[in-house]
Image: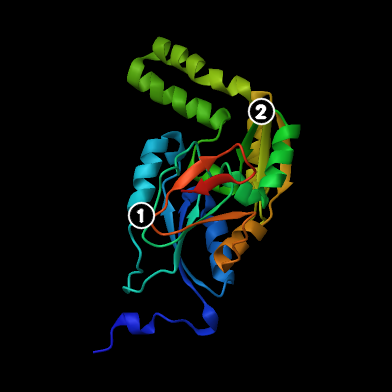
Amino acid sequence: MISNSDYSVLPGGAKRLQLIACKVLQREAYFCAARTKNVVDVVLMPQGLHNEPDKLRTEVQKALERTQDIQGRAYDATLLGYGLCSNGVVGLSSSIPIVIPRAHDCITVLLGSKERYQEYFDSHRGVYWYSPGWIESGRQPGRDRYEKVLEEYRQKYGPDNAQYLMEVEQTWMKEYQWATYVDWGLSESQDYKAFTRDCAAYLGWNCDELTGDPGLMQRFVDGLWNEEDFLVVPPGQRIAEDVTNRGIIKAQ
């Protein structure tokens, strides 16, 4: 009997890759995966894991243990569609190579380079990012979030306690001054842009719009892993923090 593994070699030197990514990158991941000659299986992880780095590490490590596709064919590598993400990726390892962008978070992937991310970050104090994936997957700061959370608190804790909890919850927003929307133009984005502007107006923030760059993500799935933009972690080694250097992360 011929097994599925007998068909593991693809024409033209194409690779079989697994891309584990946060759900906020869903549209961008599928877009680039559809355009590459490589066979890329996209595995989406829940949005919000970066808020609990230990949980992110645990859940992604479980996903990294899958080294074959559903047909039993071995992956050449696992692509990790995350940045450093509050050190949530530190310590991750696999029995096959891991490739990860040199990035602090997923916004680098949307913007196309860590240099562009850093330049914008340095010139815009207190940026909160909006994108199609972030708007679709989570509750972005704004009127809608405020009203829904307030109602949840009222039902759980009563009106007086709810108002106090909202005041406490809103304190972190004082750190921000900008609502910046970034996307690749993959879908009708006017509604999302308007949503971002409304959020900024409600919060008293400045608003900006940036056109994203798919170049980094496309090179990621194409297997063009230059040292400047990507870290290739050999089997058995782990991802480590390296923020004192331009590379942000390293293997050890």
Residue found at the far front of this picture:
252
Residue 35 lies in what quarter of the image?
A: bottom right
Compare residues 48 and 62 and report the one nearer the observer: 62
- How far apart, in angstroms, are the residues tagged by discs 1 and 2? 33 Å
Label 2: element kind: loop
Q: Is residue 165 left or right of residue 176?
A: left
Residue corresponding to mark 2: 126
The residue pinned by badge 1 equals 63
Question: Could you tell me residue 148's position as x and y percent?
Answer: 46, 29
Q: Amino acid at mark 2?
A: Gly
Q: Residue 24 appears at what percent x and percent y? A: 52, 48
The residue lying at 34 percent from left, 84 percent from top is: 6
Can residue 186 be seen from the camera position used here? Answer: no
Residue at image location 54% in from the left, 45% down from the top: 249
The secondary structure type at the circle numbered 1 is: helix
What is the crowding at mark 2: few (fewer than 14 residues within 10 Å), some, or many (at least 20)? some
Which three-letter amino acid code belongs to the residue tagged 1?
A: Ala
